[in-house]
Amino acid sequence: MSTIITVPHLALREVATPIMVADKKTLELIKDLDATLRAQTKPQGVGLAAPQLAIGKRAFVTFLGPKKSHQMMVFLNPIIADHSQEVIFGQTPSDEDDRLEGCLSIPGLYGPVPRFTWIEVEYQQLENGELVTKQNRFTDFHARVIQHEFDHLNGILFTDYSLEYDLPVYREDPETEKLVEIDKRILEAF
Amino acid sequence: MVLTSIPKPKILFAGSFLEHSALILEKLMRAPEIEIIGVLTTPPQPGGRSKILIPTPVHQLAISHNLPVFTPTNLNEKSLAEIEKNIGRPTLLLTAGYGKLVPSEWLTFPQLAALNLHFSLLPAYRGANPAEWALIRGETITGVTLIEMSPSFDTGKMVAQSALPIAPTETRETLYQKLYQLGGDVLPAMLSAYVAFRSPTDLKNDTGYTSIASEKGITYFLPPLEQTSSPTPYATRLTREAGFIGWTALKDAVAGKDSAIKDLSPQLAEIIKTTSLELNARFLERTIRALVGFPGVWTLVTTAKGEQRLKILQAHLGEGRPATTKVHLILDTVQLEGQTITSWENVKNLIL
């Protein structure tokens, strides 16, 4: 298990390099991502990318599923092969409320982020000591989580969208649990 | 990425069943897990001698809490558009004693689902009068079931269920009181569990089977479970005529005899037939409890004024007499046509 690094940190801003071989180091990285994400409870983590452990490799995991039976899914060298034309702020196209994204590397801040409603992802997984290529279509919340983690591999943070598209960012008041809008100038330091 | 807290589900509540539906609304308004954003109820009906229009208790409660109230006569596109214009799309539509069948175009209006709280342990006692039917048929247990609404009454998939024992002296009024009380107590947890299940963070359907879990007296079926065929007859709406029982049958029950003459309302005759019950003191005592208030048990007796209606308001069972091992019916409170409520003793000598 490793410590998740937080902003500001240069490792969060670098473009990660591909994983070329299915060696012991790759296996260790996957195990580390798995253990670190599982241990993350308050707030509950649903995705973690290697750069968040200060490891500049193209790997991330997602951890979603029905209550108490979340499933870990590993993505190595992912490519977004295709995606919807439409972008949404909610979790499903029929969801009319904005749902907020948060990031384990940006504690306490939340904001709406436009994401594709569906994506077609080509990625690799480790199977019997080999890198095996897979392709899958993801929708709704899982598609959102993958896009968020994919951005980490290119040094992009969700707050970059807040600045680019002038979207609100909120801080959770630990006492009242209410969200308070923050001054976005602080995000430029990330 | 982290999981952000799921916003409180916004609920459009629909209920019209007297103070019972209002009790549920009151409990839901106090529940911190959910937010009531509007109320749907039947339009004010003329009541009392003056026939002034009286809003339902749900309507009155909603107004006193400044909640938007909608009283469409017809559930159509126009009345739906009116609701949407005022409060937007709710997360859930929840009905509890609303009485109208929600048309299929309305079922897709809420963002997540249209749910109904039914007052029986489904699939038993589908229909408009589940508590009355359970009482008449002598059930000792019933309950409430939260279902996803379907285009026909009470056949949707089950979400959660909670049971309630039926006391030997229960009337339809005390039973509905208890069932709605129970409903108000269990709904916040049931609704939260449903919303959490349906929230897009859950990759539902990947297991393919329903997990059944019980917690605090509630049994959850998630993903929602298809109902099997009903083990009981359909609890059809009882009409005003349904409470008729022939005087001979009542006299026989008072004497502790099974009545051979099946002189009673078609609905009661149907219950006896489908359940293979005897028309006797036990059946009649249960039926009087089951129908008190509405439609009420009544009979026709001959007095000096000719044939008159006699309402049976209260009765109880007596032990078997020495001559027979059968229990018998003892009439307590009655009301003769055009007279005030009185004890049976005051009336029995008027019957020829």
Image (cartoon, coloured by chain):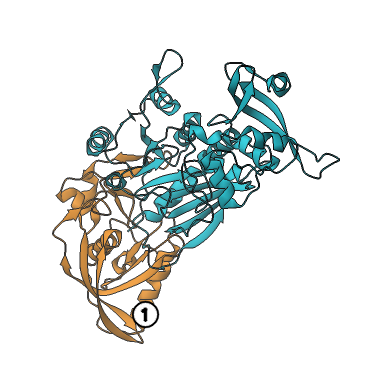
Question: Can residue B86 be seen from the camera position used here?
Answer: yes
Q: Quadrant of residue A145?
A: bottom left
Q: Looking at this view, is A32 or B277 the one in front?
A: B277
- Helix, strand, or loop for circle 1? helix
- Position in image of residue B287 (x %, y %): 61, 38
Which chain shows up in orange?
A
Chain letter of disc 1 in the image? A
Q: Residue at x 75, y 36 (%)?
A: B255
| Left or right, B128 with reference to A85 | right
Q: Is residue A2 above or below residue B175?
A: below
Compare residues B303 and A137 and report the one nearer the observer. Answer: B303
In the image, residue B113 lies at what x, y percent?
Answer: 35, 49
Q: Quadrant of residue A28?
A: bottom left
- Direction from residue B113 to residue B309 in the image, left or right: right
As drawn, the residue found furthest toward the left would be A85
Quadrant housing the C terminus of chain A: bottom left
Label 1: which residue? Answer: A27
Question: Residue B83, relative to residue B5: is it above or below?
Answer: above
